[in-house]
Image (spheres, helix red, strand yellow):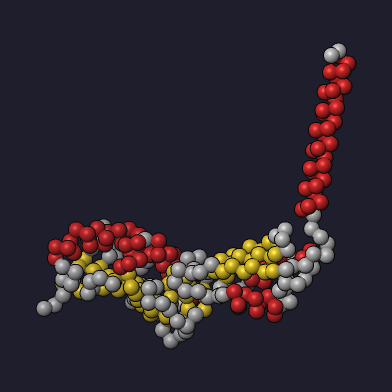
């Protein structure tokens, strides 16, 4: 075969390959291009279940969308505004995040992450509420037995700025999440909020004082629990004071 024939054959192969590539790209474009008249045939609503309490469910989400004329089923898919749906649902006090997207099968998927409370707060003379780890106040009139509860002289600002971080720490720490049952807040002589902890194990009260440096305070207490309580007994002391740096002051129970 001479050089001319080889050149023509190679050129033909290249042209065939280019033709195949153009055809594949064109086919993919046609297959993936949405039908301008395609309707939303189904709505898939997913709401993650909270570890302690569920604030919102799929029925409530559907009602919200219908109320604001955003429920997409039966509408032309290209006219469904996913951003508007996300904005509406994110505006709900129980929702932390939302993802909304269309599928090639004509379905709209809505995935909702609800807020996760870390504590239930019962202020003196006021209605109770939840607070999440980001300091968001979540309304609610009941709490579950497996969630730490804070009572006493508690403002929403203190709950949001101080107790939320403490509650988040407790939930993420297996030892303290199992040990602390209640938090009691009251004002000292200088009108500053101080904290007492009521443990699940042991008939004593833990006085934290102010919440500054609570991680170090609880670390000292955990070491004390592990080294001393097994020897002296969990009911020997009625009060354990952690307010002083690098020491623990215990008050013995009166006989």
Q: Give the residue drawn at x 38%, y 65%.
A: 170
Residue 226, by quadrant, is: bottom left
Vertically, is 165 above or below 183? above
Quadrant that contains the C terminus: bottom left
Extreme front residue here?
A: 1
Visible in this render: residue 22?
yes
> Where in the figure is residue 228, as x and y percent of width and height?
17, 61
> Where in the figure is residue 63, as x and y percent of width and height?
65, 79
Left/right of residue 174 with respect to residue 30 in the rendered view = left
Left/right of residue 220 with respect to residue 92 in the rendered view = left
Q: Give the residue drawn at x 82%, y 23%.
A: 10
Vertically, is 3 above or below 242? above
Quadrant that contains the N terminus: top right
> Where in the figure is residue 85, as x and y percent of width and height?
69, 69
> Where in the figure is residue 57, as x and y percent of width and height?
56, 75
Extreme left residue here?
A: 255
Q: Give the residue drawn at x 79%, y 64%.
A: 38
189 and 113: which is toward the camera: 113
Visible in this render: residue 96?
no
Vertically, is 190 above or below 4? below
Left/right of residue 160 with respect to residue 217 in the rendered view = right
109 and 99: which is toward the camera: 109
Extreme top residue here?
A: 2
Residue 18, by quadrant, is: top right
């Amino acid at each position: 075969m001479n050089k001319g024939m080889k050149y023509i054959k190679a050129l033909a192969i290249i042209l065939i390959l280019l033709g195949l590539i153009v055809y594949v790209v064109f086919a993919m474009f046609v297959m993936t291009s949405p039908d301008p008249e395609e309707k939303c045939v189904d709505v898939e609503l997913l709401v993650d279940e909270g570890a302690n309490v569920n604030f919102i469910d799929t029925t409530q989400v559907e009602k919200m969308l219908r109320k604001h004329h955003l429920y997409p089923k039966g509408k032309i898919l290209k006219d469904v505004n996913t951003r508007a749906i996300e904005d509406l649902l994110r505006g709900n006090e129980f929702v932390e995040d939302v993802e909304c997207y269309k599928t090639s099968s004509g379905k709209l998927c809505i995935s909702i992450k609800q807020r996760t409370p870390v504590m239930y707060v019962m202020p003196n003379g006021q209605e109770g509420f939840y607070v999440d780890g980001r300091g968001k106040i979540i309304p609610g009139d009941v709490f579950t037995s497996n969630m730490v509860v804070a009572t006493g002289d508690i403002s929403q600002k203190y709950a949001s700025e101080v107790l939320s971080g403490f509650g988040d720490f407790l939930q993420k720490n297996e030892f303290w999440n199992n040990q602390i049952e209640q938090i009691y807040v009251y004002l000292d002589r200088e009108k500053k909020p101080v904290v007492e902890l009521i443990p699940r194990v042991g008939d004593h009260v833990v006085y934290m004082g102010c919440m500054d440096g609570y991680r170090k305070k609880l670390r000292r207490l955990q070491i004390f629990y592990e080294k001393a309580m097994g020897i002296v007994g969990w009911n020997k002391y009625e009060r354990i004071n952690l307010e002083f740096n690098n020491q623990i002051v215990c008050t013995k129970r009166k006989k």
